[in-house]
Amino acid sequence: MPKNFKKMNFYERLDIGPTAASFEIRHAYNAACQMYTSGSLVSYSFFSQREREEILLLIEEAYQTLINEQTRKQYRAELVRRGELAEEDTAATHKKPIDVFAFSSGHRSGVIVAKHDALKEKIAESETINAILQKKNIGGADLKQIRQELGIELEHIAKLTKIRVDYLKHIEADAAASLPAPVFLKGFLKSYLKCLCLEPVEEISGRYLERLARSGGG
Amino acid sequence: MAFVWPIGGGKGGSGKSFLTSSLGRLSAQAGKKTLIIDLDLGAANLHTLVGVPYPEKGFSDFLQKRIPLLEDTVIKTSYENLFLISGARDNFDIANLPYAQKMKTLRAIARLDYDRILLDLGAGTSFNTLDFFLISQNGIFVTTPEPTSIENVYRLIRSLYFRLIRYCFTAQEYKALGEEIENKFGQGATNRPDTMMNALEVIHPQRYEKLQDELGSFRFKLIVNQLRRYDNASLGTQISTMVGKHLGLHLEFAGNVAYDDHVHDAICQQVFFVDRYPYTKTAMDLKELSRQIVEHTGQQMSLRNM
């Protein structure tokens, strides 16, 4: 059997927690009035007229006490003294505003920067890559070889550049005609090169495009 | 063991049989072997709702011992996975089921092998209805958003409450207890659940504990049926809060079912509303509700072995 309504504390009467803010108290009071007022479908036939009036008075008492900061403080102190409420529950925990710029700052880009340095080192050390970069014509197959030498998956590039994997595959297959429109090729290619830290981007992409134009692919 | 859902609600005309048949149909459609039993003894009509106008056997055959096993009274409907035990063709005194036969029935229902069993119960608060309702802890109350209907739901809940108290005592003990409470707590004390429980706590602390456990183990559900557009949609939540706060019973609000004139048409044509008008708000509401029954994976509370 639940507690008699009269024996409930003011928070229980209104169905709210001890740290409820004033608007929550007001809201709970409105909801309770709706439920217990005469003519309410819910409580009609659940209580006799006298019981209902008693309950409404008790709710009014709870609301008037809790909505006033001064009396609420006194009531809280009384509950703590009676041992019904722990000390730490009484202080309303004010939520601090969240810094809009706080999330996703620093961490992610930091990882990429660290990777950049590692990649550049790898490129400098690798003979195969340097040999390819020395070539006058650079084709899709060359790019693919460099990428595989660096051990980077296409999916990884796709994730960073937001370019679809099949478009990246078209670039590596010299199939520029399969791209959505020719104008995309240059931009996609640059993103791809930047992702692999191949420098200078402008120059290498120029060599690729030139070769493609000569072979009639573009 | 099957999941048993008794569907009751106190007031007649609130849509218990309609909801039973619709939920049964939807549960069968979802691939659960579903049995619906018409326990509205003396006023059976579920067979008409599920397209079996002339059931060749039924519940009364079991009671009259013409068919010894309850599972042999099951009729296959024309819908896959949907089975019926009809209450039609019964004797005219069936509404007053003797105690021994009731116990026999309850035990037989508990032994049936189906995925989901829905019991369509009658209106009112007769002992038959109460005992069938308490066979499982998953009873479903049906009400409409009208004061008369809600009044009867409260009445049914209180009756169930007293029935549970009554189970804890023998007839003689109960009578003696009643007198003792009247003497100690004044006239009318046995008529209210809260004073009754307070009295029990003092007089029989051990049984009081047991009773508390039992009351806490119920997981009732509430469906608000025939909700018109201008009705208060949060009525169900409020009723559930009310019952929880003042009676300490767990009554979960399961959902609203919108009112639709076409329900009348579907019943007159003797077809399932959810088949005839599948894209109405009402049908959507029913589907949403049936999901709770179909996907119920929690443990089936023990069937009361009375």
Image: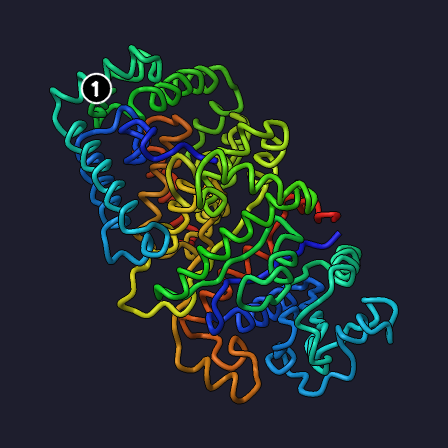
Residue lying at 53% horizontally and 73% vertically, measured from the top left: B18
Coloured how?
rainbow
Q: Is residue B178 left or right of residue B262?
A: right
Q: Is residue A72 left or right of residue B113?
A: left
- Crowding at dot 1, Cα within 10 Å, few <14 / some 14-19 / many 20+, comes out as some
| Snapshot quadrant of residue A160 | top left
Residue with the mark numbered 1? A75
Residue lying at 24% horizontally and 35% vertically, measured from the top left: A58
Seen from the viewer's position, the closer of residues A156 and B87 is B87
The x, y position of residue B86, in whole percent, is 70, 76
Amino acid type assigned to the residue bearing label 1 in the image: Tyr
Helix, strand or loop at label 1? It is: helix
The x, y position of residue A31, in whole percent, is 25, 45
| Residue farthest toward the front in the current orientation of the protein | B183
The x, y position of residue B246, in whole percent, is 40, 41
Seen from the viewer's position, the closer of residues A49 and B189 is B189
| Snapshot quadrant of residue B57 | bottom right
Q: Is residue A189 above or below residue B123?
A: above
Q: Is residue B61 left or right of residue A62?
A: right
Q: Chain of mark 1?
A: A
Residue lying at 87% horizontally and 76% vertically, measured from the top left: B66
Residue lying at 61% horizontally and 79% vertically, measured from the top left: B45
Judge whether residue A142 can be spotted in this image.
Answer: no
Q: Is residue B22 above or below residue B248?
A: below
